Structures are given as structure tokens and as C-alpha cells.
Amino acid sequence: MKTTTDFKERASGRPTEAQSGAAEWLRNRLGTSPLEEIAAEKTVPRHRHSLWYYFGGMTLFLFSIQVVTGILLLLYYRPSAEEAFESVQFIMTDVSFGWLVRSLHSWSANLMIAVLFVHMFSVFFLKAYRRPRELTWVTGVLLLFISLGFGFSGYLLPWNKLAFFATRVGTEIPRVFPFFGDFMMRFLRGGDEVTGATLTRFFGFHVAILPALTTLILGVHLWLVQCHGMSRPPGPGYENGKTMKFWPNFLLRDIMGWLFALGLLAALAAIFPWELGEKADPFASAPAGIRPEWFFLFSFETLKLLPAHLWFMEGETLGVLAFAVGAAFWLLVPFLDKRAARGLPSRAFTAIGLLVLIYIIVMTAIGFLA
Amino acid sequence: MNSVKQDVRDEMERMNKTTRRSFLDYLLGTSVGAVVVSICYPVLSFLTPPRVAESADLTVVAGKVKDIPPNSGRIFKFGSRAALLVRTPAGEIRAFSATCTHLDCTVQYRDDLRGIWCACHDGHYDLQGRNVSGPPPRPLEQFKVNVRGDEIVVSRG
Amino acid sequence: MKARLYTALSVAGWLALAPSTVLGQAATAKSANSCVECHTGLDEGLAHKMQGDIHVEKGLGCVGCHGGDPSQADQDLAMAVSRGFTGAPKPSQVPAFCGKCHSDAAFMKRYDPAERIDQQAEYLTSGHGKRLNQGDQTVATCISCHGAHGIRSVDHPESRVYPTSVARTCGKCHADPNYMKGRLPTNQAEHYEKSVHAHALTKKNDLSAPTCNDCHGNHGASPPGVASVANVCGTCHTRQAELFRKSPHNESFQQLGQGECLACHGNHEIKSPTDEMVGTSKPATCVDCHAEGDPGFTGAAEMNRSIAALARRLGEAEKLLARAERAGMEVSRARFGLTEGHDALVGTRVLVHGFSPGLVKAETQRGMSIANQTWKQGEQALEELQFRRKGLAASLLVIGFALVAVYLKIQQIERAQK
């Protein structure tokens, strides 16, 4: 048990009067908080790849922007085919700062996915998933899947033309699974077609089911991060023993990053307000250039490039099954990488990671240029 | 002598540090406070319901029944377009898009003709919105009318 | 239940018999039809052509028009004059041939009580009919336009006289220089194709847009006389015709023997009118008659000025709104106001036909005030945009300050930690 004076000295050298006054007041009533203990104890390893440690926090920050702006949007959004588009239009035009809140929500969503990918690949290449952090990795990958689910369901909510048709294509994909494919499509769409029922259902996924799952899994993820501390990569060059205090040194740097992100988001939202497009019309023919959001583009492009028939099955079926297997593999990486578990270098997995990364980048590029 | 000088220098150094420190804390406090304000201001004004009537295109209260006598019509705003509310000589209430299908002029009700008329090119529509003479190529789009108490509620249907 | 089964069976039976009875007079089962039997061998396309023919659909077969007796297997007996056989009519006989039924009110009433029966009479008043009477066998008769075998109802899209096909059908003769040699010019179809009417009909699919017969008449086809041009155009363009009749041009055009509308708009090649048609330099048509110094010239200049000013102002307001909209601003209410300004402009273009500058001016002024109001709303939207930009700059400044402060704080803490 650390005493409060211990903490004070450890934490910030010499706290200012105001800080210590308020903190003291609280401490006298609540006792030492676990947060303080964590802050006092926690350190972050310092080495040439320390930069990557900031991306987890950045993802968390962007996620909290999503929560705040999402809750704000809920005040005016109406989840029905008749009113969704109009209500988003209303938010964009009539509600004071509505344009800002919606544009922030869209921009921050995209930035969050991008940062999340950076976070994931840095963890992958620095082998931070190795024992004892397997479950941290698994929960992290689950959070990625959930984020993609957020992206997919949120894309439809403004009920505009492009999103409508992209959703029609997207919800068609699970159909290729044998036995339960049709059921999955119907489950996603809430019927046989993409209709107002799909919108209401996606709204439910987006604001209730996925947030609940996220809360749970994110809680576990953060708790595990806390339990195990930051991973120091294996191999020479990292075993220098240098560390940095989490509070205040690391967190203040984190905050600098967040402030920067906040400024960037404000600029993006003000200069490039997120477009609304045209209202979806289920009876209109599909417009040219339907494409999913950029983070689905690599898989979309793969399915497009696959030949109609491959071996004994349809190309698309094979592609979707391959993606499913790939996702399962990715989820189970810590259990498969036996060498990293023993603290040995595992070039094979680094190579696999590089291949996946290059594949995603190339396919996304093709999708953008096509 | 020397030690006194040293003492003075030390003291000044300390004072300097303290001012620099408190100035930095002041700067930090103000700028973080300003960031918080610049976040809270948009959020609070977002929460304030906008004063303008909501542009829910689909259902519009077009007026009161008592304000529209039989054999008359009036223009009202339906979403972003003009619509025409018509009360037939028989007392029935109907609503149409007021945009002439010919060249997008706004049509009007003519009580002398007992029909809908577009002044621009003398287009005539009957009380069902059908184009009966003149240049209009298509009938007017008709909207659904419901009377709720005294209010006439028009919706696209 | 029994009744329904019976109906189903009889429908099935009828369908099975249908191909063989298509050309039969009454659908009596198994009766041999010698017309079909022989003529299928002679002309394979004929039976096929007759499918969908309005007469066949109404239950009339070969005999309905040509007479004879299809129950006779022998050719001479089947096509004996004594059995009413008339054969194929010569062009001069065609009007009477069709008129046998189509001019018979009692007969036509059995098929369509609202059907007109004056086509033959009207035809005889037409340019075609008059020449036919003079012994010209090359002019158009009923079958030239409607076809002989395979005649569709006139409102059937495959009919040769369906609105979209009329110009082609007339052009078959009237656009053929060899055929029309020494009679009429042949450029009408070509000119019509370029007209606003053809565009409306074929591109915009507006079936009410006029084609040849809407101005020239169909059965009574002949060019409208100069005096009746305004009446012909005025059947659709009523408001313009009404204004024109009250205008100073009405009397002077009549005195000059000018075809009212076509003096400015032409006849077959009627282009979509532009604002430049009113003015004091080409392509304005006013200068065809009015020269500098006469009041018509000044009036034209005045109308041109006010219309152009309104169109320009509306265009500017529209552009301003578009700019604000692209930047994500709310302008739908302003746009709503702009439609009224657009009304005024369209109205002005009609009022021109009154050829009175005062009339035009009043309307353009109304439009002008609307356009100005819209313009103001557009500017307000852009001001709001500026507010956003300034807000962004301010918040970036604040965030920048905070960044610097945090940075300095880190420096300070780390110096102390050392």
C-alpha cells in the first residue's frame, strides 16, 4: 500500500497548489483510487519503436469522439426509410452545428479505422501478441471486427443512394455460405430485400448491440493491457531497460496526439463536410460506381477479380470462405506462432504479416483506381 | 561577499523558475479551458432545438379546414416544393404538386373554371389533377390528404 | 367450382384452336379456310403479318374485306364474284373499299360506339383526295398510311400512325425527291426532325407533342392557309395566340399577308425559342421588319433588355446558391423562392407575344425583386460559411496553444525528474 505522499512525489514531481487542493479533497473522502495506483506504477518501455505505443490510445480517443458525436446525432436522427434521409438533411442544415457533429462522426469513424489498423499491425510486427498477451490480441481482433460492423451498419443510416446499393451488395455476400447463408442474409436484411426494415435493424446494431459488445470487449482488452503492462518486443535492441512513466510523461504525450487529432478533425469537418448524396430509391436502377467504404475495398476488389469458377466451386464462394478462414487465422495468430511464444524471432509470421499488409494496400489501391 | 552574491543569484534563479512555472501552469490551464469551451459551445448549441419548422418532407399540415371554403385553392409549402390544396365545389379536399408538368411554373386554382390552371402557358388540369388542355404533358402528382380534427394533413402517398 | 372448371377448359380449348382460326371468319372449329390454305403457300409472310391486325382481333377474316367464300376448296368457287369476291382494290378504289365499313355508322357502332365515320368524307377534302379524284393514282390513300395487312389500332405503339411513327410514315413519300418530283419540296421531314416538337415527341416521350397530322390534319391533310396559322398553333399555344390577337402585330400581319406565328418561328423547323429572338440584332427576328428609329425597334430593345436582365439576375442567384450548397450550406428555402422567380421569367417569355414592352416590364420587375431577395439569402449562407471558417481558425488556434502548453509542461516535468 502506497501512501499518498509517495504518490505525489512519484507522479508529478511537485504538483501545483490548485491540483493538490482538489486532489487532496477527493482523496480525503474517497481514499486512494486504483487509478492513482495504476498511474503511479505503470511504465512504458522506451526503445526505437516506442512511437507505436501511442496508436492504441489514439484509437480509444477517436472511439470516444464516436460515442459523444453518436449520442448527439441520436437526438435528431430518425431510423426509418421515410425519414432517415430527411432527418440527416435536417441535422446538416437546420440544427446549429449539426453539420459539424455529423461530419466529425463520419471523419472520426474513418480515421479511427485507419488508426486501428496501424495499431494492429504494429502489435503484430512487434510480436506483442505473444504469451501472456494472447487474449489481449484476440479481444483486439474482435474489436476490429466490431468496428468494421460499426462502419458497415453506419454507412447505411443516412439512407442515400450509394449506401443503399452498397448495402445490397454487402448483405448478399454471406449468402455464399453453405446451409446458413440464406438465413444470414435474411438476418442482416431483416427480410429478403434491403428495405426500411434493414435500416431499422442496422440502426439497432449500430447504436445498441455493437456498442454493448464493444463496452464488454473493450473493457476486457483495457483490463488485460493494464494487467500485463506494455509489451517490450523480443530480440536485441529492445532490452535496454529504459522506461518512461505512464503518468505524466506518456499520457501527456498522448494528450498532445489527441489535441492534434482534434484539430485535424475540426479542419476536415469544416473544410470537407461529409456529403449526404441523394436519397435512396429502392426502385431506381443501381448508379455507376457503387463501392463500399474504403476499409472494405480490398475484399470487395478481391471478390470482383476472382474468376466465376475456381476448382470445384464458384469463385465468389471460395473468396468469401477464404476471407472467413483468413479472419479465423488472424484471430488465432498468438496460438499458432509457437516461436514468438517462446521469445524467439519468428520470421515466418513477420513475412505473413507483410504479405497481408501489402495485399491489403495493393487491393485497396486497385479499388480506388478502378 | 562572494557568498552573498551567490545567495542573491540563487534567490533570483528560484524566483525566475517559480514565475516561469506558474506562468506555464496558467497557460496550460487557460488553453485547456479554451479547448473545453470550444468543444462545449458547439455541443450545447447542437442540443438547443432549432427554431425553424422541421423539414420532414412527408407529412405537412397544410392548414385548417375552415380556412379553405369550397371552390377555392391555396398554395402551401410541401417539403421544398410548392403544393396546391384544393377544395372542390362539392367540398372535397385534395392536394397536388403545384409544379406544372410543362415548364415547372406554379399552378393555381381558378374558381371561375372550377379547375387548376397554369398561367404561364394556359395549361388546364381538372380537379383530379389530370391535364385536360394546353401544353402540360402529364397530370399533376397527387398527394394524400387526411383531415385530423380541424387540421388538413397532407402526405406523399 | 364446376363452372370455373368449364371456363378453364373452354379457354384452353380456344387457345389450342387459336392459331388455326386466326384467319377464319367465325371461330367455328374444324371449318376449312381455303384463303389461308392457298395463300400461305403463295405468300408465307401474309398469315404472319395478319397476326395482331385490328380487324382479325375483332373477328373479321379475309372475307371481311375481300369477300368470297373460304369454305369452298375450289379456287374458282372460293373467289367467285358471285360469292361477293372483290379482290385487291386499285388505289382509286381504296377509300370506298375501306369506307364500306368505316363510313357505315350502324356497322361501326357494333365495334366501337364512339368511333368516327367521317374519314372517307374528310379524305376527299384533302390534298390527297382531290388529286385522287383527278385520276392521280400515286397519291396516298388509306392503306398508304395505315398499311393494308397487319393494320394496328391507331393507339397501338406498332401502328404506322402512332404519334412517334407519323413523321416516318408521311416521309415515306414526302421525303422522297424522286416520288415528289415536280410536286412538292421534300425537306419537311428533315426540318421537322430538328424541331422542338420532334424533340419533345421522340426524346422526351411526350406523346401530346405535335407531329405532321396535328397541324395538317390527318384524313383531311392539307397545308393550313396563312390566315389559319395562328389558329392551328393556338390550339396548343393558347395563351400566346390570345396575346398575339390583342397585339399590334395582329392587324399588320393580316394586312401584309404574313403567316402569323411562322414569321418568327418558321414552320417545320421550329426551334426551341430563345430570349435572343427578341432584340435589335440577329438572331432576333424583329429586325426582319423593324429598323432603327421606328417604335417597334425601340420596343424590341426594351423587351430584350428587361428579359436578359432578369435571366441574368436569376442565373447569378442560382449560381450563388449552388456555390453555397456545394459548401454544405442550407439553401433549400432560398431555392424555393427562386422557383417563383423562374415562374416570372417563363411568364415573361409568353408575354412577349403581346408585343407591348410595358406588359413585359411589369412581370420582369416582379421577377427581379424575387431574384434579389434570393441573392441576399445566398449571401447570408456564404456569410455563415465565413463564420465556420473563422470558428475553425479560432479553435485551431486554441488547440495549438494547448499543444504548445502541454509540450512545455512535459519539458518542465522531465527536467525536474532528472
Image (cartoon, rainbow, N blue to C red):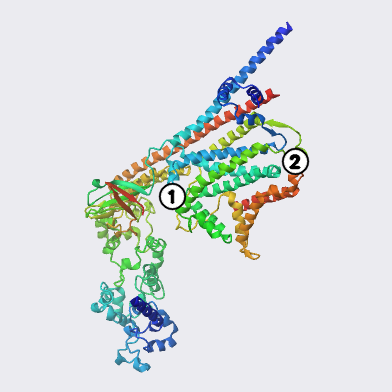
Does A284 appear above or below A128? below
Indicate the secondary structure of the residue bearing disc 2. Answer: loop
Quadrant (top left/top right/bottom left/bottom right) for the N terminus of chain B = top right
Which residue is tagged 1? A80
Quadrant (top left/top right/bottom left/bottom right) for the C terminus of chain B = bottom left
Q: Nearer the viewer, residue A85 or A14?
A: A14
Is residue C165 visible in the rendered image? The answer is yes
Q: Position of residue C327 (x, y in %)?
A: 48, 42
Is residue C301 visible in the rendered image? The answer is no
Whether residue A239 sits left or right of residue C1 in the image: it is right
Q: Nearer the viewer, residue C262 or A38?
A: A38
Does B144 appear above or below A137? below
Indicate the secondary structure of the residue bearing disc 1. Answer: loop
> What's the amino acid at mark 1?
Ser
Which residue is tagged 2? A234
> What's the amino acid at mark 2?
Pro
Whether residue A218 sits left or right of residue A194 in the image: it is right
Callout in the foreground (1, 2): 2
The crowding category of the residue bearing disc 1, from other C-alpha atoms within 10 Å (few below 14, some 14 to 19, many at least 20), is many
- Chain designation of label 1: A
At x 30%, y 89%, the residue is: C84
